[in-house]
Image (spheres, helix red, strand yellow):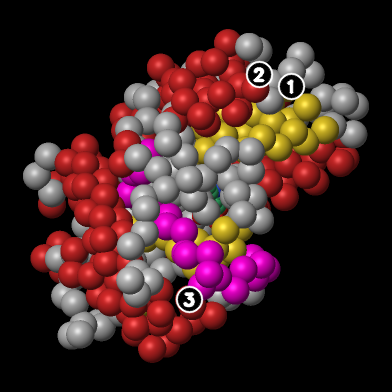
């Protein structure tokens, strides 16, 4: 089969020629114009560093928070600019104080790095980690709500839930979960690494205690641009991972939260400086802006999944309403070598990459147990690319079994 072409929108990105890049989900991919904008900020920083950091940066980052707040329907003052979702999760978990026997609730689909943070913090305080199992395949979002709410006890202090799960690509009923959990007095840490630019987020209305999201994934901003939103009544307890000048800075007419998060030592903030441009860039290029982009990517993910299921005889493991712009499929059991540790590359991933030039994640997950592969759908992808993936998987023996 001939190598497929990308969509016309691919002209906005500088992706490697000949590569079938179906993994936007892991690290995102940044359009050429946004990378140029980031370099402009880096030049400005190095042309006169003192003016940049002392005079320019506070105002520029304020504009960034305002632009983000507009996307997120929240107040700019409640946003802290952090480098990635892992830092956002760590910031919250390592700020909080737990008592022995307190419970932290987490579904088994949680991203491993964030789960590690929960385990680390729980052990330090003598808290208990309660893991709830969410079925996969899953028929209805209610099953996820029932599983998570069924894990709540009077000792539950915090629940970490996802907007969209990483290994299983499930769009969680996170709005419902936040309402129910916060209603039961459980603070929610929303891991929205796959959040902004992928699903609509209205943070003030949502009401979660803490939300962190990567802008470098689905907003297509430069790497190292993420945010942490902390609800006003929780801000006094949350401190950046790096304590700096802000701890003792005279308060003036701002908050300690702002002071502490606005300066965490000298670092390259160009990714955050380029954020307002990144938000406008794709919204201007694509008619209908971000809501049209999200809808387009969802439709393409559904279409891509259908193409793969039809060609390989697979059953979609969740309804279309439970995927956003990534979709996970379960490799047939009899083909599975199973049990490959997460830090080791699955041989199928390597074969697809080296033999067919296809980039997709393939992994074995302990719970829900299975060997999975995941597709992503971003503006630059085309249906042809999923057909090519289906063909490559058939060549590797993953086609429907002979009658
Ligand atoms: C659900 C989830 N949480 C957290 C992360 C971590 O993101 P980062 O590596 O940018 O911190 C990811 C990354 O893919 C993720 O999928």
> N-terminal of the two: label 3 or label 2?
2
In the image, is residue 249 part of the stretch drawn in magenta? no
Along the line of sight, the residue nearer the viewer: 282 or 218: 218
Q: Quadrant of the C terminus?
A: bottom left
Q: Which quadrant holds residue 322?
A: top left
Callout 2 touching callout 1 (CB < 8 Å): yes
Q: Is residue 57 left or right of residue 82?
A: left
> N-terminal of the two: label 3 or label 1?
1
Q: Which residue is mark 1?
A: 156
Q: Look at the picture and state if 199 lies above or below 226.
A: above
Give the residue displayed 40% in from the left and 43% down from the top: 318
Instruction: State the CA–CA distance, disc 3 to disc 1.
Output: 39 Å
In what element is the residue under mark 1?
A: strand
| Span shown in magenta | 322-343
Q: Look at the picture and state if 204 lies above or below 20.
A: above
Q: Is residue 381 left or right of residue 35?
A: left
Q: Which residue is mark 3?
A: 349
In what element is the residue under mark 3?
A: helix
């Amino acid at each position: 089969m001939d190598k497929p072409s990308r969509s016309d929108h691919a002209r906005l990105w500088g992706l490697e020629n000949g590569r079938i890049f179906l993994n936007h989900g892991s690290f995102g991919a940044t359009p050429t114009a946004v990378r140029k904008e980031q370099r402009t900020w880096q030049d400005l920083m190095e042309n006169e560093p003192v003016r940049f950091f002392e005079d320019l940066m506070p105002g520029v980052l304020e504009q960034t928070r305002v632009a983000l707040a507009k996307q997120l329907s929240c107040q700019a003052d409640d946003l802290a600019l952090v480098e990635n979702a892992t830092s956002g999760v760590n910031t919250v978990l390592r700020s909080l104080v737990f008592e022995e026997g307190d419970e932290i609730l987490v579904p088994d689909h949680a991203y491993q790095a964030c789960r590690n943070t929960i385990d680390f913090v729980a052990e330090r305080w003598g808290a208990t980690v309660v893991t709830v199992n969410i079925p996969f395949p899953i028929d209805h979002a209610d099953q996820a709500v029932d599983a998570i709410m069924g894990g709540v006890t009077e000792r539950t202090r915090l629940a970490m839930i996802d907007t969209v799960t990483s290994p299983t690509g499930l769009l969680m009923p996170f709005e419902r979960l936040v309402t129910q959990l916060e209603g039961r007095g459980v603070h929610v840490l929303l891991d929205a690494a796959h959040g902004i630019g992928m699903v609509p987020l209205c943070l003030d209305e949502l009401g979660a205690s803490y939300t962190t999201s990567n802008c470098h994934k689905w907003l297509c901003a430069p790497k190292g641009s993420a945010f942490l939103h902390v609800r006003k009544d929780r801000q006094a307890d949350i401190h950046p991972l790096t304590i700096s000048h802000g701890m003792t800075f005279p308060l003036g007419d701002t908050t300690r939260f702002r002071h502490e998060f606005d300066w965490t030592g000298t670092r390259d903030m160009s990714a955050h400086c380029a954020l307002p441009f990144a938000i406008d860039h794709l919204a201007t290029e694509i008619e209908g802006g971000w809501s049209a982009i999200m809808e387009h990517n969802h439709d393409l993910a559904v279409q891509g999944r259908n193409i793969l299921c039809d060609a390989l005889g697979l059953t979609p493991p969740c309804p279309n309403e439970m995927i956003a712009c990534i979709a996970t499929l379960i490799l047939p059991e009899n083909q599975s070598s199973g049990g490959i540790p997460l830090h080791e590359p699955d041989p199928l991933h390597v074969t697809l990459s080296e033999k067919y030039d296809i980039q997709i994640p393939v992994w074995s997950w302990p719970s829900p147990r299975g060997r999975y592969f995941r597709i992503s759908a971003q503006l630059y992808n085309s249906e042809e690319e999923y057909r090519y993936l289906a063909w490559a998987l058939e060549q590797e023996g993953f086609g429907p079994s002979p009658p």
